[in-house]
Amino acid sequence: MENKKIGFTIGKFAPFHKGHEFLIETALKEMDKLIVVVYDTDVIDVNTEKRAEWIKEKYPNVQIKFAHNPPPQYGLDKESVNIQMKYLTKIMENEKPTHFYSSEKYGKCVAEYMNIIDRRVDNERQTVPISASQIRDNIEEKKKWIENRVYLDCKDKLKN
């Protein structure tokens, strides 16, 4: 029997945008199972469950896990990576992922720590040239990069 390919990704999805969709769609084409870990954040006034709902509505086949109360220390230095990886490993403890999907430099750290494949998608953001922070900075100007229901949930919560 062939081993199952299990991918996962993490994010705040604040807000969930076309770049996230491209990453998830890429993973769904390549994996037998995809887990999306949605992190708590205060960068947007939309709760974690609502942000997870955006993903689940569009991609009902993904499995959602929540990263509530993540450690505040993050970065690519050894100590921060260790703290974050212990936290993430606990969230993923009953899973056996084979691939980590991201568009971020930390993808290498996660993959190495978990001894799985680092699968970078649109690392330079050329296919989908957007980031959540750009959307948060001006949701009206950037709303073409998010679905209407995401826009409606966010428009009054972001100051433009």
Image (tube, helix red, strand yellow):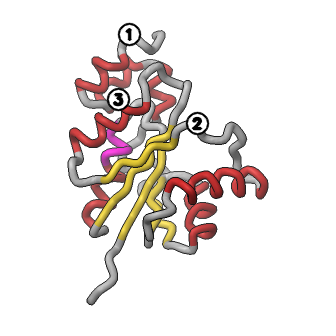
Q: Are marks 2 and 3 in contact (CB under 8 Å)?
A: no
Which residue does the numbered mark 1 point to in the structure image?
156
Residue at image position (29%, 86%) is 2
Quarter holding residue 96: bottom left
Q: Badge 3 local density, few (<14 within 10 Å), some, or many (20+)?
A: few
Q: Nearer the viewer, mark 2 or mark 3?
A: 2
Q: In the rendered structure, which disc, 2 or 3, sits on the residue that comes first in sequence?
A: 3
Q: Which label belongs to residue 46?
A: none
Q: Which label belongs to residue 69?
A: 2
Q: Amino acid at mark 3?
A: Lys
How far apart in space, not on screen, are marks 1 and 2 (Cα)?
A: 25 Å
Q: Quadrant of the N terminus?
A: bottom left
Q: Please determine whether, in this image, residue 138 is positioned above or below residue 92.
A: above
Residue 40 in view, yes or no: yes
Q: Badge 2 local density, few (<14 within 10 Å), some, or many (20+)?
A: few
Q: In the rendered structure, which disc, 1 or 3, sits on the residue that comes first in sequence?
A: 3
Number of labelled discs?
3
Magenta stretch: dominant secondary structure: helix
Residue segment shown in magenta: 17-21
Q: Amino acid at mark 2?
A: Asn
Q: Toward the viewer: 82 or 91? A: 91
